Amino acid sequence: MLGYDRARRWFAVALAGLAGYVDAVGYLSANGYFVSFMSGNTTRLGVALGTDPTRAWPPTLLIAGFVSGVTGGALIAHRAGRYSKPAVVALVTALLLCAATARMQGAPIAMLAALVIAMGAVNNTFQRGGEVAIGITYMTGALVRIGQSLAHRLCGQPDPSWRSWASLWSGLLAGAVLGANLQDRQPMGCLWIAVAWSAVMIVVALNLPAES
């Protein structure tokens, strides 16, 4: 986060909010499985394998879908060059549109497939040297950075970096709260809001100032 200007940091927070929103909708739609939090799905896979292997297929398919989304997003980012951010977000928007359409047509498996692929792809939005620079859908690293920053302060070494990471984490949390609320109240309409949100992010990505 600290290696980016203010506009890109806020863009990352907005995308984290979108990821939290989509993950909450997916979680409530998939009986406690995640479409962006693969650590949770990996734990559920391990529990299933250790207790009842017949229940291992949902987390296995979700993890595979997420990895395929990361792969597809990375290919798009590579081919798009300097337009990698809007290109990746455009892919995410298209997948969210597929998910919203699948829900309207009563196809929950197709909906979850599109959601998990989208959440894998979105992690390619911020890359440096071919590596993910900011993980949009997973916050363990952000919380570790916050804890390290606070430890530095306690040792008398001012470290303001926790604010940026806390903003990213807060974005995901706020998005999850909103997603859960709207999934509960507007289940057939909440994914269309995600589509609109993601479409706005394409416009934001296209208008980000040139990187120095």
Image (cartoon, helix red, strand yellow):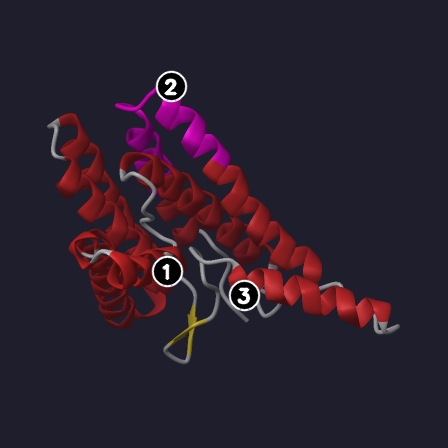
* Residue 171 position (above or below residue 163): above
Tag 1 or tag 3, which sits nearer the N-term?
Answer: 1
- The three-letter code of the residue at mark 3 reads Gly
Q: Secondary structure at mark 2?
A: helix
Contact? badges 2 and 3 (CB < 8 Å): no
In percent of the image, x 17 and y 55: which residue is there? 57
Question: Residue 176 magenta-drawn?
Answer: no
Residue under circle 1?
A: 43
Contact? badges 2 and 1 (CB < 8 Å): no
Residue 126, horizontal then vertical, whole percent: 43, 65
- The three-letter code of the residue at mark 1 reads Thr
Tag 1 or tag 2, which sits nearer the N-term?
Answer: 1
In percent of the image, x 51 and y 67: which residue is there? 211
State the CA–CA distance, disc 3 to disc 1. Answer: 17 Å
Tag 3 or tag 2, which sits nearer the N-term?
Answer: 3
131 sits to left or right of 76: right
Residue 108, horizontal then vertical, whole percent: 16, 36
Can residue 94 be seen at all in this image of the molecule?
A: no
Write the start and end of the magenta stretch as one range. 177-200
Disc nearest the viewer among 2 and 1: 1
In percent of the image, x 49 and y 64: which residue is there? 210
Residue under circle 2?
A: 185
